[in-house]
Image (cartoon, rainbow, N blue to C red):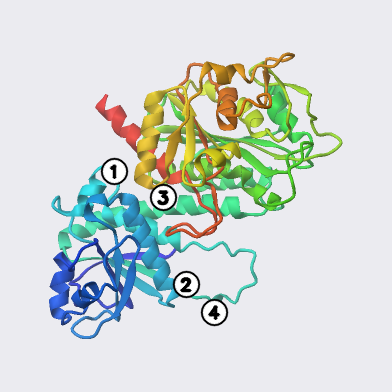
Amino acid sequence: MIKTTIKNERLIAHKTECLVIFSTEEKNPSGKLAELDTKLNGIIKSSFKNKRFQGKLNQTILLNTKKPMQAEHLLLVGLGKSIEITADKLRQAAGTAAKFAEKSNLKTVSFFIPANDPANYISVALSESNESFAQTVVEGSLLSLHHFDEHKQLAKDKLSRLKKITLLTSLKSQVSSLRYSASKGQKITRAVLASRDLISQPSNIATPTYLADKAREFAKSFGMTCKVLATSDMKRLGMGALLGVAKGSEEPPVFIVLEHNGGTKNDPPVVIVGKGITFDTGGISLKPPASMDEMKMDMSGAAITLGTLSAAAALKIPLNIVGLVPASENMPSGRAIKPGDILTSMSGKTIEVLNTDAEGRLILADALTYAAKYKPKAVIDLATLTGAVIVALGHEAAAVLGNNNELILNLQKCGETTGERLWPLPIWPEHEKAIKSDIADLKNIASPGVGAGTITAGAFLKSFVGEIPWCHLDIAGTSWSSEEKPYTPKGATGFGVRLLTLFLEQEVKNNKNH
């Protein structure tokens, strides 16, 4: 992790390779920028005047500064129109700035953190969330600088990498709150990056057993408890759906139970369930070869679950939280399940398997049944479940479906703040009817022509939840990015860790208010 420090100095006196100041979209510099401009003989104002910089979102301009400033360069970054600023726009701007500095071969960068003032446009934008300006900047910059190059033969000394980020305040009274916020931002970012790394690992390394080892490692690091169920345990519990999917693979399945006991002893927990298909060939219903390599990311739900539990434990969130990960490969072999086979799930419900590539919902069925043992206050599952969600929402949002509108709304609000958008889809009686089988209790896909692939998958999962407040997040379109974004590299995004961490923090607040 890149070193992050706090400094209390005047802007003029601060020595750094690059000083970053955020600006809203306006005709002339105002506030701190205008103040600074008088000392810099108007170079900032002239950049505005000749429209080389206007403060548009993620717009940058690098100015070479000379005396009286100690900073070698001044980097202005746009936040867009002041009335439209959100926490996520600030996060994007911070990511844009950090990436710009790294690509410019700079080793140190300093962000000016303005006073936390109710009259300040950004303070107002952040007051809705649990975040502060400093936390958001730390998250945006550190998330943008993540590189997964574990498997490259690199000359490490030749790589241009940013070494240090400084948060600069001109108020001494702000130092301790900045320290707290920066530390919080680092803990959350570390969890997101751990999730990204898990998703990025190739499936010949990231097997179900590897996931179990990582879960044990996280448990040890953050004081959680971890239990891993083996095949024999799953047989004893009657997890026929999960074991059915695993049959075609040489890799043994695992069922990971990770617990953060932050609340009082008998408090019902929030249970988070993550789909852990470490590689998905589609099984006997084999996928086409194009882009099949990306199917190593079919355990994104598992990675997000492990990351969220790590964040919750690192932040010592005073809540009982359970992470459940059913993990397996989905492979074609002489032992693999076939279309038309019937599996008996842990709940006792029988499932006719019409398509072996609809395997995620099978392993989640047993995990959701297991979750009910905790008598939880809520269950949230995450899965790269359907290609249909990309048809519906593209790569801009994940779908949220569930049986509890308050839970859906709370998750949606958190997603707006963290920039991990959720869009609700319904589950109507017709959708539930569409997954009823003629020869078993359920079938794992609806009949051809029904459509609504994401919704019927959600309806299938709903059959295993009962009355517990439950939400399903289909993250198939958001967990992997084919383009670089301000604080997300190409590849694994870690979508969901920050959203769920904020949701868990809000749960604590809600508990206090009741």
In-image side of 159 versus 106 (left or right): right
Q: Is residue 30 above or below residue 273?
A: below
Residue ID at (30%, 30%):
510
Type of residue at label 2? Arg
Q: Tell me the mark number nearer the camera, choosing from 1 and 2.
A: 1
Q: Which mark is residue 188?
A: 3
Determine whether the residue tagged by mark 2 lies in a helix, strand or loop.
loop
Q: Is residue 415 above or below residue 482?
A: above
For marks 1 and 2, give the CA distance.
31 Å
Residue ID at (65%, 31%):
363
Type of residue at label 3? Ile
Determine whether the residue tagged by mark 4 lies in a helix, strand or loop.
helix
Type of residue at label 1? Ser
For marks 3 and 1, give the CA distance.
15 Å
Which quarter of the picture shows residue 104? bottom left
Q: Residues within 10 Å of mark 4 (few under 14, many from 20)?
A: few
Residue ID at (56%, 40%):
391
Please give the residue where the numbered disc 2 appears in the rendered image.
Answer: 161
Q: Position of residue 295 (x, y in %)?
A: 66, 47
For marks 3 and 4, give the CA distance.
29 Å
Q: Are marks 3 and 1 in contact (CB under 8 Å)?
A: no
Q: Position of residue 416 (x, y in %)?
A: 36, 42
Type of residue at label 4? Lys
Residue in front for this viewpoint, 240 or 58: 58
Q: Tell me the mark number nearer the camera, choosing from 3 and 1.
A: 1
Q: Is residue 396 above or below residue 14?
A: above
Q: Residues within 10 Å of mark 2 (few under 14, many from 20)?
A: many
Q: Position of residue 51 (x, y in %)?
A: 26, 72
Please give the residue where the numbered disc 4 appears in the rendered image.
Answer: 158
Which quarter of the picture shows residue 41? bottom left
Determine whether the residue tagged by mark 3 lies in a helix, strand or loop.
helix
